[in-house]
Amino acid sequence: MDTNTLCEAAHAGKYTTVKQALDAGANPNVADGQMHTPLMLAAYNGHADIVKALLAAGADVDRTDPVGRTALMFASSGPFPDAVRALLAHGANVNLSDRGEGWTPLMWAAAEGNLEVVKILLESGADKERKDADKDTAYSFAVRKGHSEVVRLLKESV
């Protein structure tokens, strides 16, 4: 299986295709033309079963794309608590920030209003006081986007 096929299967949620490729010895850390790994692509679409299979096959949980985004950042930008939990269970760094704006997974989740993901990240030690390149925090993103439940959670969490 070539690189593009594995990446496309991970992105599309084709578990059987991904599993067969991994069982046949495919490298879980290959990257597509945009330097996104199958793990990043599966996380972006919340395919937790594929995330788990790739991690079990040795995918690098904290590998970054050209702007410094990790699979955890991709999963946190969507309502994908199962994928987020799987990545954290395999040691994903909850406080890494991208090289573009300096966003952390918590900032991605707060900006998108993903309440359950915000809870999971906070429980996993996410730094809610962390500031991005523009001095914004996860809280300020949630306020600006009108995500009142996320605002309340970030305000109340210790």
Image (cartoon, rainbow, N blue to C red):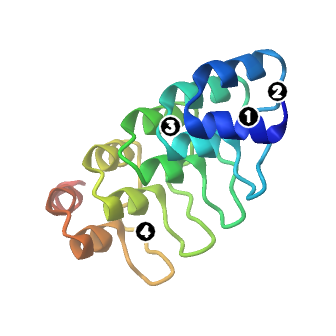
Q: CA distance from mark 2 to mark 3?
A: 23 Å
Query: Tag 1 or tag 3, which sits nearer the N-term?
Result: 1
Residue 128 pos. (x, y %): 35, 62
At x 68%, y 19%, the residue is 19
Is label 2 in contact with label 1 (beta carbons under 8 Å)? yes
Which residue is disc 3 drawn over?
88
Residue 133 pos. (x, y %): 51, 81
Q: Quadrant of residue 28?
A: top right
SS under mark 4: loop
Which residue is disc 1 drawn over?
6
Residue 88 pos. (x, y %): 50, 37
Which residue is disc 4 drawn over?
130
Q: From the viewer's perspective, is the residue at label 1 or at label 4 nearer?
A: 1
Seen in the picture, residue 40 relative to 153 is either above or below; the reply is above
At x 40%, y 63%, the residue is 107
Which residue is disc 2 drawn over?
26
Q: CA distance from mark 3 to mark 1?
A: 23 Å
Q: From the viewer's perspective, is the residue at label 3 or at label 4 nearer?
A: 3
Q: CA distance from mark 2 to mark 1?
A: 8 Å
Instruction: Name the amino acid, label 3.
Output: Leu
SS under mark 1: helix
Relative side of 24 to 84, left or right: right
Seen in the picture, residue 152 relative to 78 is either above or below; the reply is below
Query: Tag 4 or tag 2, which sits nearer the N-term?
Result: 2
Residue 101 pos. (x, y %): 54, 75
Q: Is residue 61 visible?
A: no
Is label 2 in contact with label 4 (beta carbons under 8 Å)? no
Relative side of 61 to 101, left or right: right
